[in-house]
Image (cartoon, rainbow, N blue to C red):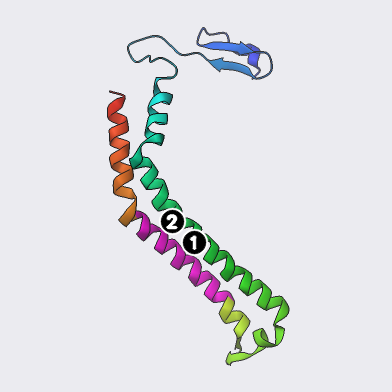
Amino acid sequence: MTSSSYRGPEHARTPDRGPVPVARAGRHARPPDARGDVYLQVQASPEFQEIRRRYRDFVFPMSALFLAWYLAYVLASTMARDLMAQRIVGEVNVALAFGLAQFASTFLFTWLYARNAGRKRDRAALDLRWDTQERFR
């Protein structure tokens, strides 16, 4: 379907990108920047900034920890081959145990993230969402 097949009044034309929806008039029509202004106000609000701060306070250190843990595995695998080859029990060596611990730590970090979000951000974000939605009514 080409852009020339759009003939309805609800589409405008741009030379390079084809049809562009045009805002319709009616009882639900708003000025084009009304929603944007509300979202900019919310973004500047202390409540939103607090949610973002709580998010950053958790995510950045945990990301750094996870990256360091992963790089330790990679470096140990390439530079400490004798250590990684040492057997722990039967055919299980340090490298295999370290690799399985990588999977376990991924689940642990995911659980910690969900727990942190539930305790420190979800309620505040939901309250902010409801306040924002009330501004549109």
Q: Position of residue 114 (x, y in %)?
A: 38, 58
Mark number, residue 94: none
Residue sitting at x 31%, y 24%: 136
Do callouts 1 and 2 mark residues in contact (Cβ within 8 Å)?
A: yes
Residue drawn 55% across the image and 75% down it: 100
Mark 2, residue position: 57
Chief secondary structure of the magenta portion: helix
Residue type at mark 2?
Asp
Query: What x and y, as percent, mark residue 76?
Result: 66, 78
Which is more toward the observer, 41 or 122? 41
Q: Which residues are magenta?
A: 99-117
Q: Quadrant of the N terminus?
A: top right
14 lies above or below 55: above
Which SS class for mark 1?
Answer: helix
The residue at 49%/61% (across/down) is 61
- Depicted 24 relative to depicted 81: above or below: above
Asked if residue 101 lies in the magenta stretch, the reply is yes
Q: Which picture quadrant has residue 137?
A: top left
Residue 4 on the magenta span: no
Left or right of 101? Residue 36 is: left
Image coords of residue 58 (percent x, y): 43, 58
Q: Secondary structure at mark 2?
A: helix
Q: Quadrant of residue 43?
A: top left
Quadrant for residue 88, please give it: bottom right
Residue at 36% over, 10% down: 26
Q: How many marks?
A: 2
Please give left or right for residue 130 compared with residue 102 in the image: left
Q: Residues within 10 Å of mark 2 (few under 14, many from 20)?
A: few
Q: Which residue is mark 1?
A: 61
Amino acid type for the residue under numbered disc 1: Pro
